Amino acid sequence: MAGYVVVGSQWGDEGKGKVVDLLSSHVDMVVRFQGGNNAGHTVVVDGKKTILHLLPSGILNKNSLCIIGPGVVINPFVLLQEIDTLEKGGLKCDHIRISDRAHLLMPYHVRLDELMEKKAGDLKLGTTKNGIGPCYADKYTRIGIRVCDLRDWDVFQEKLQHTLRIKNEEIVRLYDGEPFDYDEMVAQFAAVRERLLPMIIDATDKVNKALAENRMVLFEGAQANMLDINYGTYPYVTSSSPTAAGVCTGIGISPRLLDRIIGVVKAYSTRVGEGPFVTELLDETGESLRETGYEYGATTGRPRRCGWLDLPVVRQAVLINGLTDIALTKIDVLSGYEKLPVCVGYDINGKYYETVPASLKDYAAAKPVYKVFDGWQEDISQIRRFEDLPLNCRKYIRFIEEYCGTDVAMVSVSPEREGNIILKELI
């Protein structure tokens, strides 16, 4: 078996892009298995920052075949724009393939997302307004349009005509919005169709054959465990399953083919958008974490909400995903704090809990129970050996391992690709 998975263990933005980029030089294939261009993966190489939304983070390694899987919703215009941007910068993108079973994210999905968020007012979900939810909704109500439909232009036009009639009625009747013109949309897709056709493959067959040949395949998720449609802070979640189980449905492989499941954990907590956040800091410390860690959304630019590390959240990710390893990121951001509180449980109406409650009301009422660690003042960004880290930093890391029952295999001490301490080889 040679299947490796990288997933987020909090609310996203943990640094999955960096981890995937680091590992991609050792694998034959990098496969994105869910989500859409609501993701924002940032990779820094030689001081140059690259932000990816749809393309797998392994795209920077030209020797790894990059596949966008069946579980992803694909905005073709965003995809081609990303490819064009990278190629203008000198990176060839002829190693990208897209699944014929993936769903196309259409212009009406984006507009509906915007209109629904606006109408919701104070009850808005805080989506990226990129149309992800409406596209997945069409998938499950079985009126979606798939990538394979681009091959048969008559089928594409027939499906678009049917679905657009439904969507235009919804846009006008429910939201008093502007309907789309069918002919204009057909022309839009006709203009990009020829570029997309050579990329389309049977991704499920391709990936399974690679695994059968014992080739190394890295599966990359977007978002994170606390945004999972089943296990996150519903309804403030994404519309897919960014867990390790999502690999099996999002690509079409057996769970027996997954060898290592790596959970990326930020050394503190952040989240974007609405929803409860138990350790959130609405003070100067929270602002300090935001500025030092540059906590602004790669997709939306929105400032991220910041707080101390919430370990019940991480341990839930360990259990649900079956994490074999933790990649700990952004611990350098914590340098300079005298004390570092870590949430080890919740006080909910006078009762102590170590698990994340399903009820949003209960979770919103939770107060963090902290274990406080002494901080460190040293700049650790150039350290490459665990034993050279300040003692208090090492204690912080070892407690995470002890609480979660999972080894920290890698510690990121700077945004650069090389800015890591490897405690255990991941591949």
Image: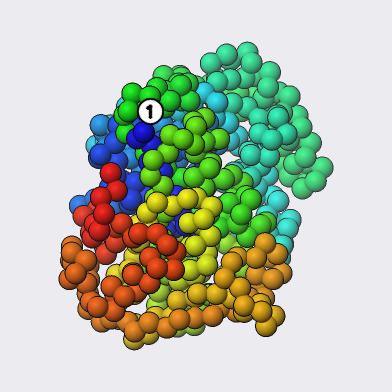
Front residue of 206/81: it is 206
Counting from the top left corner in percent of width and height, residue 279 is at 53, 75
Q: From this viewpoint, which residue is outermost toward the bottom?
A: 338
Tell me the SS state at disc 1. helix
Q: Quadrant of the N terminus?
A: top left
Q: Position of residue 85 (x, y in %)?
A: 35, 39
Percent of width and height locating residue 239? 61, 46
Could you tell me if residue 8 is visible in this image? yes
Residue where numbered disc 1 is placed: 211
- Near-viewer residue (128 or 118): 128
Q: Is residue 324 left or right of residue 352?
A: left
The residue positioned farthest toward the right in the image shown: 173
Q: Is residue 39 above or below residue 191?
A: below
Q: Quadrant of residue 375?
A: bottom left
Give the vertical position of 222 relative to 72 (above or below): below
Q: Amino acid at mark 1?
A: Leu
What residue is drawn where x is 52% and y is 47%?
A: 242
